[in-house]
Image (spheres, grey):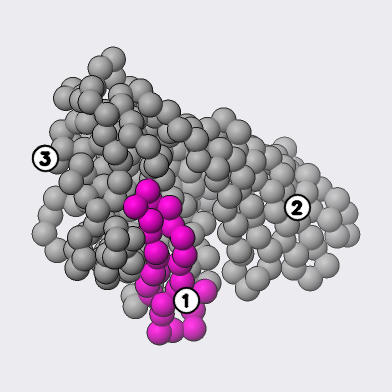
Amino acid sequence: MVLRSIILTLLVLPTPAMAGVADDAVRLTYRLPASEVLYYDASSTLTQRFSVMDRPIESAVTTDLELRMTVVENVLQRATVDVEYDYGRIHTRLEGFEEVPVQDTVIEVDAIKGLRLRMQVEPTGTVSSQEVLAAHEESAEIMAMLRSTRIFDRLFTVFPSTDVSNGHQWSVPMHDTTIAPQGLGLVVTDGTLEHTFLGTRDTLGVTCWVVDVTSSSLRQFGEFKRGDVQMTLDGGGSIVGRAYHDLRTGAVVASRSQINTTVTMTFTGAQKTSIPVESTVVLELHQPTRTR
């Protein structure tokens, strides 16, 4: 775990010049071979900081997943892929009240076995459709939890439809809706992602396209209701990240991104209370070197 974090951190550090950068224009595209199976180790760490009755509280939730992405078919470079989960673990830590011991729990998520997400992916990486395929009733709730980790965001970078050269920039609108378990509410994230092509680089033994992504205009809003208590949230933030894509197929080899947001949660019911919440989400995704 520590070695993986060090490697991924070094990969995303800004560099004065990218080794092996190509000056010639290239077309960024996904060419995923049919029947190809790709394995990924994915991690999402959500840290939140807020205050209750003038007491600072910090919580951290780390979700570790082992993913398997199978290319079911590829017709005219439009790929049908299934994403399955071989392993899942959630580590939760909460501290802040002196009267209450630090809560530190780890649970294994067995319910994700047999859960599949099928996606139709365009040559540019745009996901045109997706559906949940599962054999158990918990699939909707589990999928909502997995989507809230934002790990899916790192599987595909949306490429431009024109050739690019080193330094080329393009914008992609972002709109995402996360539904809370039991349908208690939803959170909407809007914004524009700014991408920059940094050329090619050898990474973990693979020649890759390197793409940076940033945004300083993210907005989050939503509402939840349970019984007589209603909660709304509104705020915004930023994102910064870097992804490495296999030059041969376009498939992501490694990526790391960080999302920082500040939202105000307002509770209404017997009385009205507003709580500012600072959140940081760190996403890491890479193809493992070990054999499964």
Q: Amino acid at mark 3?
A: Gly
Regarding mark 1 in the picture, which secondary structure is present there? helix
Q: Position of residue 264 (x, y in %)?
A: 72, 42
- Vertical placement of 113 versus 30: above or below? below
- Vertical placement of 21 versus 110: above or below? above
Which residue is label 1 attached to?
Answer: 139
Q: Position of residue 246 (x, y in %)?
A: 21, 44
Q: Amino acid at mark 2?
A: Thr
- As measured in the structure, the alpha-carbon distance from the residue carrying label 2 to the one carrying label 3 is 47 Å
- As measured in the structure, the alpha-carbon distance from the residue carrying label 3 to the one carrying label 1 is 37 Å
Which residue is label 3 attached to?
Answer: 205
The quarter holding residue 57 reads top right
Please say whether residue 124 is visible from this viewpoint: yes
Regarding mark 2 in the picture, which secondary structure is present there? strand
Please say whether residue 58 is visible from this viewpoint: no
Task: Describe residue 158's horizontal placement relative to residue 226 as left or right.
Answer: left
- Vertical placement of 106 versus 286: above or below? below
| x 30%, y 41%: residue | 28
Q: Position of residue 236 (x, y in %)?
A: 64, 38
Q: Which residues are magenta?
A: 115-140
| x 75%, y 52%: residue | 232
Does the residue at mark 3 contact the one at mark 1 (Cβ under 8 Å)?
A: no
Q: Amino acid at mark 1?
A: Ser
Q: Position of residue 112 (x, y in %)?
A: 38, 72
Kindly report which numbered mark, 2 or 3, lies closer to the viewer in this rendering: 3
Residue extending farthest to the right is: 270
Query: Mark 2 or 1 closer to N-term?
Result: 1
- Vertical placement of 178 versus 84: above or below? above
Check the picture and name the quadrant holding the C terminus. Answer: bottom left
| x 21%, y 66%: residue | 34
